[in-house]
Image (cartoon, rainbow, N blue to C red):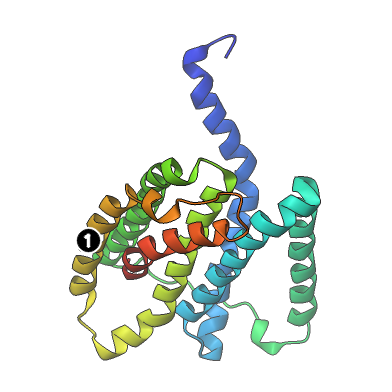
Amino acid sequence: YAQSPALADATHAVGVGMLLLVPSAAMGTTLPLLAPWARRVGTKLPTIYAFNTTGAVFGVVLVTFVALPFVGVQATTWIGASLDIAVGLWAIARSNQSEDSQVRDERAAWPPVRAACLAFSSGFVIFVLEVTWFRSFRAALAATTETFSVLIASFLIALTLGAAYAPRIRARFPHALPIILALAAFAVLYTTNAADHLDLFTTGDSASPAAPLVRFTSVLGLVIVPVTLL
């Protein structure tokens, strides 16, 4: 900021990205690495994804309302790293005992262009909504860590439901995708309008023990339909 204010924001963004790149990439690799194992044991990948997002929900809620207030940032970080190490050691020990863990070279072709575009645009829309709706929600809930955590947890719950029920929907209605996308679009428009009036549902004593639950259920009630459909 002192030497070149015009470059300060870009430098800030690049610095944060470099700090988060390795741990985020490593954690993001876990689900794809489970895909071949899931196929071998006959488990649907959406089921694994649903469990993954369920764990993320518990992580967000426990860290926001339990770990950070009681043990602080540093201890919470050590707890998270310790869990990663414990799971890694367990996986190493399990791989030495299991024949199912033999690594195979499973080089798959790139997905069709239409499927890749759909996957890209779906993720794009979800995170665009997450950022824009947060700006609306923070006006009613105040821009705090709790507000951001409530929104993240709500999105993750909806993604979990979508992943859990998608195989059933595809089995019963194999051509339902266009209808689901159309319903998602209408739900997004409704939710965007309703988000501006969220304060009507969250007014009251902000110091009440029930206040966080009221805020959480209000946000979840707004985002659950469009995000689940997406």
Please identify the residue farthest to the top as the structure is shown: 3
Residue at left 75%, top 46%? 73
Q: Is residue 27 left or right of residue 181?
A: right
Up the image or down, 101 lies above or below 71; here it is below
Location of residue 35 in the rendering, given as x and y in whole percent from the top left corner: 52, 76
Q: Position of residue 69 (x, y in %)?
A: 73, 51
Is residue 131 toward the left or the right of residue 142 in the image? left
Report which quarter residue 60 is drawn in: bottom right
User: Is 197 rendered above or below residue 86?
Assistant: above
Residue 79 horizontal side relative to residue 168, left or right: right
Q: Is residue 105 visible?
A: no
Q: Name the residue tied to disc 1.
A: 185
Question: For this rendering, which residue is in front, 71 or 161?
Answer: 71
Relative horizontal placement of residue 76, taking residue 105 as reference (left or right) = right
Q: In which quadrant is the N terminus drawn?
A: top right
1 versus 81 height, above or below: above
